[in-house]
Image (cartoon, rainbow, N blue to C red):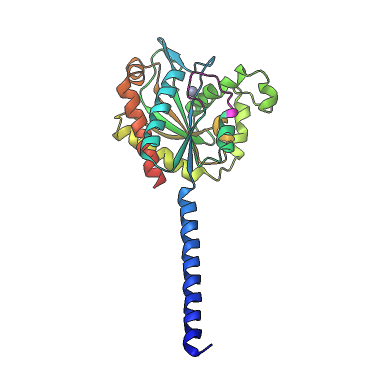
Amino acid sequence: MNYMSYLCTRNSLFNYMIRRYVATLLLLFCCLCAMPYTLVIDAGHGGKDPGAQSRGAKEKNINLAVALAFGKLVEQNCKGVKVVYTRKTDVFVELDERPNIANRAKADLFISIHTNATSAKVGPRGAETYTLGMHRAADNLAVAKRENSVITLENDYEEKYEGFDPNSSESYIIFELMQDKNMESSVKLAGLIQKQFRTTAGRVDKGVHQAGFLVLRATSMPSVLVELGYINNPSEAAYLTSKSGVNALAKSIYNAFVAYKK
Ligand SMILES: [Zn+2]
């Protein structure tokens, strides 16, 4: 081999290796881009569990309407986001199955949608978003107790939830000990949702809170629980059951999700 042909062979080998290297990088990049981001949308209650009720309005229907409208916005506008619903129809889903669905799907985010109520004849107005944590106020404990009490509709709840009594304050002590590694992301999303409820939907902003929600306890990803408004306030109930209300609330959660993902 003369010197020229040696150079040519060396150059073509070099070019070949560069091409291989670039091709490998491209493949890796495409794989990363194609990796779906999984969002789990959990419409609270359903089937035999209506959730909060007032003057004929049922929480389960409001939650489902907003969950489906929010999911539709994500499916239409966020390529690369896979939406998983814990329910898409009026069916009963056990409380521990909801985080299980998210964990099995290896979800990146879990958003649970609920509607609030108080024991008063006429409830207050406003939307709030919760992350898992220790309730620091009696009001927060009341919301968690109400949302957790659905487990008593399940046959073997005492065994399944390891003696957890949704109505006993003592049961909530465990939540104080929980250090959630996803807390920072969850609180950030909760803040963005509240901002959107205020600006996009014009709701009364009742802030971000922490409380011991069983549905958030078992998720292994950032998770929040939204309380859209108070069903036992007649003007809120009218809004929550209207098409424009459902759309504005869904758009608010969608905008917050897009901002959070960025
Ligand atoms: Zn609820």
Residue at the top extreme of this rendering: 55
**Picture quarter with the N terminus:** bottom right
Does residue 192 appear in the picture of this structure?
no
* Residue stretch in magenta: 87-97
Quick check: is 209 in the magenta stretch? no
Does residue 138 appear in the picture of this structure?
yes
| Of 94 and 142, the residue lying toward us | 94
Q: Position of residue 14 (x, y in %)?
A: 49, 75
Vertical position of residue 17 compared to residue 186: above or below: below
Classify residue 100 by image quadrant. Answer: top right
Classify residue 57 by image quadrant. Answer: top left
Residue at image coords 46%, 65% = 22
| Of 130 and 250, the residue lying toward us | 250
Residue at image coords 34%, 32% = 251
Quick check: is 96 in the magenta stretch? yes
Q: Position of residue 231 (x, y in %)?
A: 40, 18
Q: Position of residue 31 (x, y in %)?
A: 49, 52
Residue 213 as seen in the image, left or right of residue 15: right
